[in-house]
Amino acid sequence: MSIAMQTGSNGPANPPAVTSFAMRALTLCYGGLAYLIFLGTFLYAVGFVSQYIVPKTVNTGPTSALPTALLINLVLMSIFAVQHSGMARKGFKKLFARFASPAIERSTYVLLASLTLILLFWQWQPMPVVVWNIENPVLAGVATAGGFLGWLIVLYSTFLISHFELFGLTQVVAHFAGRMAEPVKFKTPGLYRLIRHPIYLGFIIAFWSTPTMTLGHLLFASVTTAYIFVGIYLEERDLVSLFGNEYRRYRERVAMLLPRLF
């Protein structure tokens, strides 16, 4: 999710179903726990890709034969891609609403996305062959700083589009308070006036900005970048369906990932 007007709901707000205080409290705790797991996973992802602090990174851990490592890593990234894209579609959201409260749909999405990432971090097979290594300390520092800048762009962009709604907290708090969910609003604050997908741009910068690129890191960066473009296609298709000509006009005047110079 990276567009300023995309939120956890898909249409007009409906009055929340009357539930007991205990169930509303349980929903609130579930959403809060999902958010905390996401937050821990996000922070670990920074260390995993940037290779700082965390015990296992994209380049550390037990090694396997190259074909085995390649197969395992591709399977792990495919699991994340299927979950991340499949659960974001309208069809899944409608199916989910038949079996559980819509208030926890976003939290469930965030929780399962976090768990698939945790699985990837845990089972990732390093492929330590060096593709490039920047030996100049100044240039190496620039590459490292670029990676952290990418992560900051990701985090900053989530707050531009309502961070807590994006990760499910707003929905469970509203449900606990017995309030109606806010309808989707079309807005383009901050970076969204320059590019349509600043979150995705931040990820691309973070994944590719490194002074030492190994074969495993290159695989991770390449596959996730390819997935980002697939995700953009699917997301924009949903946004056109949701907002119609308003989003088409936005897409015509604002660049996808790189600001237009003219």
Image (cartoon, helix red, strand yellow):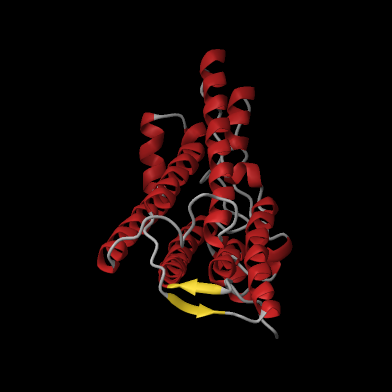
Q: Is residue 108 above or below residue 85?
A: above
**Residue drawn where x is 38% and y is 67% of the image:** 127
Q: Is residue 134 above or below residue 245?
A: below
Question: Could you tell me residue 49's position as x and y percent?
Answer: 53, 60
| Residue closest to the eye, 38 or 249 | 38
> In the displayed structure, does residue 6 sit left or right of residue 233?
right
- Quarter of the image where the C terminus is located: bottom right
Question: Could you tell me residue 139's position as x and y percent?
Answer: 67, 79
| Residue closest to the eye, 227 or 147 | 147
Q: Is residue 154 above or below residue 180?
A: below
> In the displayed structure, does residue 107 sit left or right of residue 139?
left
In the figure, residue 230 lies in which quadrant?
bottom left
Question: Residue lying farthest right?
Answer: 190
Q: Is residue 55 visible?
A: yes
**Residue drawn where x is 59% and y is 47% of the image:** 184
Question: Could you tell me residue 131's position as x and y percent?
Answer: 45, 79
In the figure, residue 66 lies in which quadrant?
bottom left
| Residue closest to the eye, 83 or 223 | 223
